[in-house]
Image: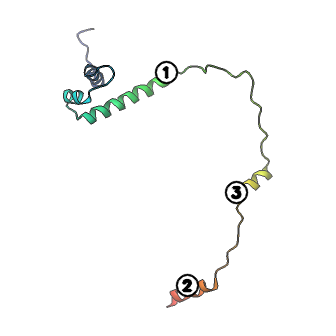
């Protein structure tokens, strides 16, 4: 490596994670102590960094599906406008509600009284 190599923060953080692990589990308490972070902050930083790396790799390694369908699927018949209008009501019937005489009288008393 050239002498002018300047590692960025994320690279140093990952290096400390590797250095303070047994390659199966990371000691975030030790990483946090070395990086001047709380252990929970080190754990969250690792989680976010791992997610960002994995998300950036998803678009680069897109592969073709293992099996390609050889036949085109049969299209289902579309509904007619008349059938769609019937389906829009959702099966609920509309009922006109007339006010109860007692309710109207009590409402009038509250307003005037």
Q: Which x, y percent locates residue 27?
A: 26, 27
Of residue 91 and residue 88, the one placed in the foreground of this image is 91
Mark 2 vs mark 3, foreground winner is: 3
Q: Which x, y percent locates residue 15?
A: 28, 20
Q: Earlier in the sequence, mark 2 or mark 3?
A: 3
Q: CA distance from mark 2 to mark 3?
A: 34 Å
At x 45% / y 23%, what residue is drawn? 57
- Residue 3's disc is none
Q: CA distance from mark 3 to mark 1?
A: 45 Å
At x 64% / y 82%, what residue is drawn? 100
At x 64% / y 80%, what residue is drawn? 99
Mark 2 = which residue?
Answer: 107
Farthest residue to the top: give it. Answer: 1
Mark 3 = which residue?
Answer: 90
* Quadrant the N terminus occupies: top left
Label 3 with label 1: CB-CB less than 8 Å: no
Q: Earlier in the sequence, mark 3 or mark 1?
A: 1
Mark 1 = which residue?
Answer: 60
- Determine the secondary structure under disc 1: loop
- Determine the secondary structure under disc 2: helix
- Determine the secondary structure under disc 3: loop
Mark 1 vs mark 2, foreground winner is: 2
């Amino acid at each position: 490596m050239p002498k002018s190599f300047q590692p960025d923060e994320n690279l140093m953080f990952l290096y400390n994670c590797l250095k303070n692990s047994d390659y199966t589990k990371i000691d975030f308490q030790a990483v946090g102590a070395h990086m001047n972070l709380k252990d929970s902050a080190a754990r969250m930083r690792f989680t976010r960094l791992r997610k960002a790396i994995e998300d950036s790799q998803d678009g680069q390694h897109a592969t073709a599906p293992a099996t390609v369908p050889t036949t085109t699927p049969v299209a289902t018949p579309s509904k007619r406008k008349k059938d769609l209008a019937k389906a829009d009501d959702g099966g609920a019937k509309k009922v006109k509600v007339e006010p109860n005489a007692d309710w109207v009288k009590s409402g009038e008393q509250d307003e005037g009284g």
